[in-house]
């Protein structure tokens, strides 16, 4: 095949080390999703309405950089078309800017808002410079669909482990380092998280091999984008994956508020729910390849999403018992975790599927626009979470919130994910059948994998 350096398939250790990239990326991005709204409103003194606008505008403007990165990759403008060097040069700066987002400079109200915009915007750009090339690694590491599902499984194990760590370690570090002073605790905790996350993001650069070159494409952007929107598989998986990010922002952004204002429990219970989300999704991710082999990729999304929607109803209308709530939330996240490896395996497959059905290879643009859509969805979700607080009349530091405010928080934390689960089921049914994808890609003869 053109651009193939060798036919050796990734070994188990290489597939495992690939997961560190999303362990780092999901941890650093998850930190901003889980704690930045709270930090901005309750620690840095920004209004909920200002934060809602910041989340929407800054992230949408920032997301424009993703197609630019895809264009650079497709046209081999940087690093000779290789994708690993992006991790080498931009991982540590990403960790640094994550820390800067939580650095409370002693500025006036306008200066604080400007600092929030600047740091959040630059952090998002650096995240794109790491995560877009990282996401393309499966396409250059292997052409085998089973290997790609395996890589996606380890990637999602890293991502869900990151969720657990974000929920279980950040707040304890904030309180340990700050001794009750959140303006001191947050920047110190984020300095540690940024340094560790930046270092972990470097691991795939050192351990993963690019066995297949991404072929150069000199087509103009309009041709590349046109080919993407003629690629039904890519369009559908991009929509469903973007919906997942809105779901994730609801859990991340409102867990602390739901715990304290609706359940009347300590802040730590919100962190416990986030930790349970990570731990349960790890188990779901590990079970995903088994389910996909037995029912196919589409049903591995449909069935768990239906079960997670049922779980959300049980969570909403069940007793306010810590054991019950943690157990049911863990079940919800277990089912959602089963969908994650399939999503990313579908992204890799849909990129190659589009090359066959449209005749245009747009690997860099395909993944970058997919990332762009996900970041817009994350921005919409973050903005929606902040807006829900404003619409409900949430008042920071109030002794008790109004019934309306509690109802809005409940809808944001539970109702939004339930609606997204059901909508995702309807959309994913439009994805091409397993047989059609297999016939189009003509994969290699399956070989038994070592490990997952």
Image (cartoon, rainbow, N blue to C red):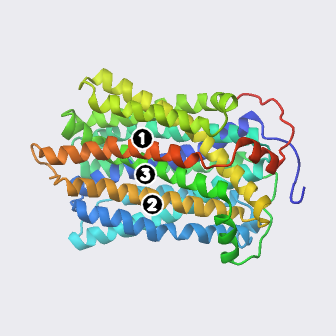
Dot 3: what SS? helix
Lateral position of residue 245 relative to residue 186, left or right: right
Where is the C terminus found, in terms of image quarters?
A: top right
Residue drawn at point x = 21 percent, y = 42 percent: 180
State the residue position of label 2.
97
Q: Which numbered disc, 3 or 1, marks the residue that appears first in the sequence?
A: 1
Res. 320 image quadrant = top left
CA distance for labels 2 and 3: 23 Å
CA distance for labels 2 and 1: 17 Å
Q: Marks 2 and 1: which is nearer the front?
A: 1
Q: Residue 451: where, in percent of width, then height?
A: 72, 28
CA neighbours of label 1 inside 10 A, class few (<14), some (14 to 19), many (20+): many
Q: Which numbered disc, 2 or 3, marks the residue that appears first in the sequence?
A: 2
> Residue 246 shows which numbered tag?
3
Q: Residue 313: where, in percent of width, then height?
A: 34, 32
Lateral position of residue 117 relative to residue 266, left or right: right
Residue drawn at point x = 32 percent, y = 49 percent: 186
Residue 192 makes an appearance in the image: no
State the residue position of label 1.
166
């Amino acid at each position: 095949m053109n651009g193939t350096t060798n036919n050796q398939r990734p070994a188990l250790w290489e597939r495992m080390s690939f997961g560190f990239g999303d362990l780092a990326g999901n941890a650093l991005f998850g930190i901003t999703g889980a704690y930045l709204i709270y930090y901005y409103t309750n620690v840095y003194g920004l209004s909920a309405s200002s934060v809602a606008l910041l989340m929407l505008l800054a992230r949408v403007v920032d997301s424009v950089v993703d197609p630019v990165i895809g264009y650079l990759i497709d046209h081999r403008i940087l690093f000779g078309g290789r994708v690993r060097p992006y991790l080498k040069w931009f991982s540590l700066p990403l960790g640094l800017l994550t820390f800067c987002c939580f650095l409370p400079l002693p500025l006036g109200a306008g200066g604080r808002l400007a600092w929030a915009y600047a740091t959040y915007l630059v952090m998002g750009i650096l995240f794109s410079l790491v995560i877009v090339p990282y996401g393309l690694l499966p396409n250059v590491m292997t052409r085998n669909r089973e290997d790609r599902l395996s890589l996606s499984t380890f990637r999602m194990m890293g991502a869900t482990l990151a969720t657990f760590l974000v929920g279980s370690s950040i707040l304890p570090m904030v309180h340990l380092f700050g001794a009750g002073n959140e303006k001191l605790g947050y920047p110190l905790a984020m300095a540690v998280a940024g340094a560790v996350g930046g270092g972990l993001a470097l691991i795939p650069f050192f351990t993963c091999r690019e066995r297949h070159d991404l072929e150069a494409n000199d087509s103009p952007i309009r041709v590349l984008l046109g080919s993407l929107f003629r690629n039904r598989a890519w369009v559908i998986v991009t929509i469903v994956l973007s919906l997942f990010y809105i779901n994730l922002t609801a859990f991340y952004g409102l867990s602390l508020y739901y715990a304290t204002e609706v359940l009347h429990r300590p802040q730590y219970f919100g962190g416990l729910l986030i930790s349970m989300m990570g731990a349960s999704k790890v188990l779901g991710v590990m079970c995903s390849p088994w389910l996909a082999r037995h029912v196919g990729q589409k049903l591995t999304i449909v069935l768990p999403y239906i079960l997670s929607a049922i779980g959300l109803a049980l969570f909403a209308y069940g007793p306010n018992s810590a054991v019950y709530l943690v157990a049911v939330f863990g079940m919800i996240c277990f089912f959602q975790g089963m969908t994650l490896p399939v999503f990313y395996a579908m992204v890799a497959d849909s990129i190659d599927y589009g090359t066959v059905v449209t005749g245009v290879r747009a690997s860099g643009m395909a993944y970058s626009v997919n990332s762009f859509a996900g970041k817009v969805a994350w921005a919409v979700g973050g903005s929606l979470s902040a807006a829900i607080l404003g619409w409900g009349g949430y008042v920071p530091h109030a002794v008790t919130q109004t019934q309306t405010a509690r109802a809005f928080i409940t809808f944001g934390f539970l109702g939004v994910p339930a609606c997204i689960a059901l909508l995702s089921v309807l959309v994913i049914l439009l994805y091409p059948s397993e047989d059609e994808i297999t016939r189009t890609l003509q994969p290699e003869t399956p070989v038994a994998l070592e490990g997952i």
